[in-house]
Image (spheres, helix red, strand yellow):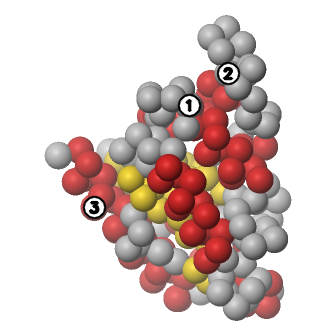
Amino acid sequence: MTTVLVLVGSLRSGSINRQIAETAVALAPEGVELSIYEGLGDLPFYNEDVDVEGAVPQSALAFRAAVAAADAVLVVTPEHNGTMPAVLKNAVDWASRPYGASPLTGKPLVAIGSAFGQYGGVWAQDDARKSFGIAGAHVLTEVAMAIPGSVVRFADTHPKDDAEVVEKLTVVLGGLVAATTVAAA
């Protein structure tokens, strides 16, 4: 069984990116389990003063354990003011430690998403790829999905009912799963 941890950059329960993540979970190929990590909002802002043995917050320990247990990571992010949301950047900071032993090291990762603007959140996705890559993840730059005009496009349609989204997610998941096979070899 290949496991993929899904990180959603929006904490809003009904967000379009959350809906895209849920659609990805439903589209998981046979032998692949995707799970949305529900605790990003519980992570305190990264502070090296508390990232010491015996003082690391339980939420950070749980997050690191979830990242470590996954075979790959799928990031689904909106764009906030031209970049990735703070909650996602904070997750990168917690997952990048301990220095030299990050649970992200070498782990295949894809960043996708949707935003209201005409480019579908590509700036946020590019920033996520950059940050996660610096943190040690094996970022798949050739696997991408940016859906523009989210507010209008999904006003009356759930992403699971949008043929283009389903098709693109299927390709994204295929690329991510293929990368886990290569990473495991």
Under circle 2, the secondary element is loop
- Left or right: residue 56 versus residue 30 is right
C-alpha separation, residue under disc 2 versus residue under disc 1: 8 Å
Query: Can you give x and y, in whole percent of width and height, for residue 105 in the image?
Result: 41, 40
Q: Secondary structure at mark 1?
A: loop
Q: How many numbered marks have been drawn onto this rendered protein structure? A: 3
Near-viewer residue (171 or 179): 179
Residue 58 seen by the camera: no
Q: Amino acid at mark 1?
A: Arg
**Quadrant location of residue 98?**
top right
Residue plotted at (23% across, 44% down): 184
Q: Which residue is mark 1?
A: 97
Closer to viewer: mark 3 or mark 1: 1
Query: Which residue lies under the disc numbered 3?
Result: 178
Cα distance between the residues tagged 3 and 1: 26 Å
Q: Residue at x 75, y 50 (%)?
A: 87
Quadrant assignment, res 54: top right
How far is the residue under mark 3 from the one under mark 2? 34 Å
Q: Is residue 77 left or right of residue 32?
A: right
Contact flag, marks 2 and 1 (Cβ < 8 Å): yes
Which one is in front, 141 or 4? 141
Question: Of helix, strand and loop, which one carries label 3?
Answer: helix
* Three-letter amino acid code at the position of disc 3: Ala
In this view, 35 is above or below 114: above
Q: From the viewer's perspective, is 34 left or right of 174?
A: right
Q: Which mark is residue 51?
A: 2
Q: Earlier in the sequence, mark 3 or mark 1?
A: 1
Q: Which mark is residue 6?
A: none
- Residue 47 at x, y = what percent? 75, 29
- Pick the residue in front: 152 or 81: 81
